[in-house]
Amino acid sequence: MDSQQQERLIEENASLKKQLADQVIELELKKRQIDVEAALDNVRLRAGVMRSSSELGEASAVLFQQLNELGINAIRTAVGIFDDPNEAMELWLTSYADNGEMTRMLYYFNLHIHPVFENIIPARQENKPYALTILSGNEVRYYYQTMSTYLSVPRQQVFNETEYFYSFFFSDGTINVVTSQPLTEEQCKITIRFAQVFGLIYTRFLDLQTAETSAREAQIESALERVRAKALAMQQPEELKDVVQVFRHEMGTLGVDELGTCDIYIYDENTRKSECWSALKDSQRAESKIVTHEFEIDLNDTWVGREMLRFFHSNVKEMSIVMTGDHHKEWIRYCETKCAPFRGHYGDERPDESYHLYKFSNGAISQSSASVISQESWDLLKRAASVFSLAYSRFKDLTQARIDLQNLKEEKTRAENALTELKATQKQLIQSEKMASLGELTAGIAHEIQNPLNFVNNFSEVSDELIDEMKQELANGNMQQANDIADDLKQNLEKINHHGKRADAIVKGMLQHSRSSTGQKEMTDVNALCDEYLRLAYHGLRAKDNSFHARLKTEFDPSLSADEAGIGKINIVPEDISRVILNLINNAFYAVGERQKAEGVRYEPTVTVGTKKLNGKIEINVKDTGHGISQKNLDKIFQPFFTTKPTGQGTGLGLSLAYDIVKAQGGEIKVETEEGKGSEFIVQLPVT
């Protein structure tokens, strides 16, 4: 082989080696690209299966793992989410523990705690892809000493001479990478791509967080709505303890396991006491049944109570009372003495706990827990307080309604007693009025009954003489004369019988007028009733004042006069209507009598009583020619106890009782008057 051939082979071999080297480099680049894409896909895949915002930490751990597998050896990686209004950051930190296990932690801190984080602010404002802070020597030691107060970073004995703090930006945060060696340009580009991918992950995180917030809010609102519904459904004030029980149960369904008891305190400023409605888990039962009870406490009796009193008098809306040692035992034993169901519930040993109270109108809602409660629990307590403000309003309404009902019952009882007394008094007054009118009738009755008695006496004496004559004629044998005398004697007996019945009717009428009304209707001759009481009233008045005289007129409807068959009678309550008629006639006589006294002989007193039948009604009218009724008195004449007569001469009940009697029988009484000419009272009664 000549030298030329040998040189050509060497050149070809060198060319082949170069091509092979180039291909190896190209393959390594492609493999690197494949590894990077695979790593990015792993991060994307983990983000795609996120079901909860809390899984962002796990996505951060996958990022840490993938960076290390790509040869980016990080001491730590973290995902930071900016809180721009507060210049702070929420940090999801991933690193390896001393035993080689991967650890994940969540922190929140201000960016101004160290220059490493402060330097992030200007770099982000200048839209740089990342920020870099390099610490060397004592700067590294100072960084870890500072951050150990904020982060769970182990206190180190040996420090790297130099550490590089990278923050690669995405829209709302950073990927933080801490290394002991500077990253190459390629490694920075890869990490920038990871940051871009993490921007998409963070969008997924925000979507999940929004969905979780909405779902949680719906869950909370549903729980509070059940408490609200229970409050609105209260029918008795004691049911407030059921509302407390529902609230304690709903807090359990919301996963607030830190709660021990739930209480409502209604504070009375006047007594410095508080009504307490309490609900707590029954630790003595496996099913964790909730025990509820209501009791009263004096806030000055215990240290915890005095702390509550201080809270009620303060301007703050919320407060936590930490109960430890003797103060805690004192409170537990005090509650046990006030509330029987709680006795023995707490046992002899009870860990320290805290009361967390939030105010509402005239009270507070509280929860107890073994330690501080989360902000979510405080927010729930605040929202529950607004619900219990509604419950308290309902409680006050029910309490007031119970008081009002009791007062109403007492007032009803007093009213019923007063009505009973009033009815009894009314009956006595009516009876007194009846007896007074009966007294006025007595003289008239005596006058009226005297006439038939005189006839009876006279015809009895004549009959006695006729019997003697008849005996004489019979002794003489004069039968015809004896028979004539017997006929005369029979006529006398018929007249005696007639006038005896007349006297009997007058007595019965007097008894009927004096007795209490049975309300029983009877077929009555109205014309005869009016005529009889007109004469009785007139003669009764003349018996008291023989100087009194008046012209009596009757204008009776003939159709209301009963014949022998009883046709013409109407169905009324005679003893009641007779009182009405008598009262109206007496008033008429009084009216004309007063005018007669004023005007003397020039004036002729006239009282007219009439009846009329029209349109299915009967009308009884009593008219006088007195002074008439003034307009100011006209609207008051039917009011009880109103009278124009001098004191001692009238009760003011006559027209009032007459009005009630007529109304009770479905009738109507009215008056027509003209001053200086007289008055007419008209009684209309239905014909049944």
Image (cartoon, rainbow, N blue to C red):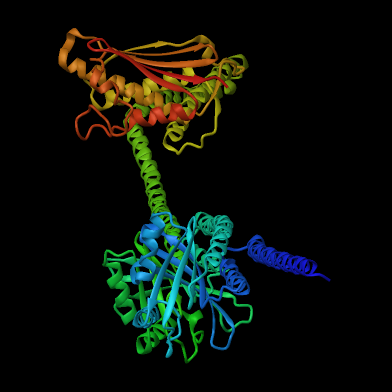
- In the rendered image, the quadrant that contains the N terminus is bottom right
Relative depth, front residue between 535 and 180: 180
Quarter of the figure with residue 30:
bottom right
* The image quarter in which residue 213 lies: bottom right
Task: Residue at 50%, 26% (x, y): give it.
Answer: 501
For the point 32% across and 30% down, the residue is 639
**Which residue is at a point 53% across and 67% down the rendered structure image?**
251
Q: Farthest residue toward the front?
A: 2
Q: Position of residue 398 (x, y in %)?
A: 44, 56
Task: Judge by depth and name the residue closer to the eye, 97 or 27.
Answer: 27
Q: Nearer the viewer, residue 674 or 347?
A: 347
- Mark count: 0
Residue nearer the viewer, 433 or 206: 206
Residue 652 location, quadrant: top left
Residue 525 visible in the snapshot: yes
Q: Does 149 sit left or right of 573 as displayed?
A: left
- Give the percent coordinates (x, y) of residue 410: 39, 55
Q: Residue extending furthest top? A: 602
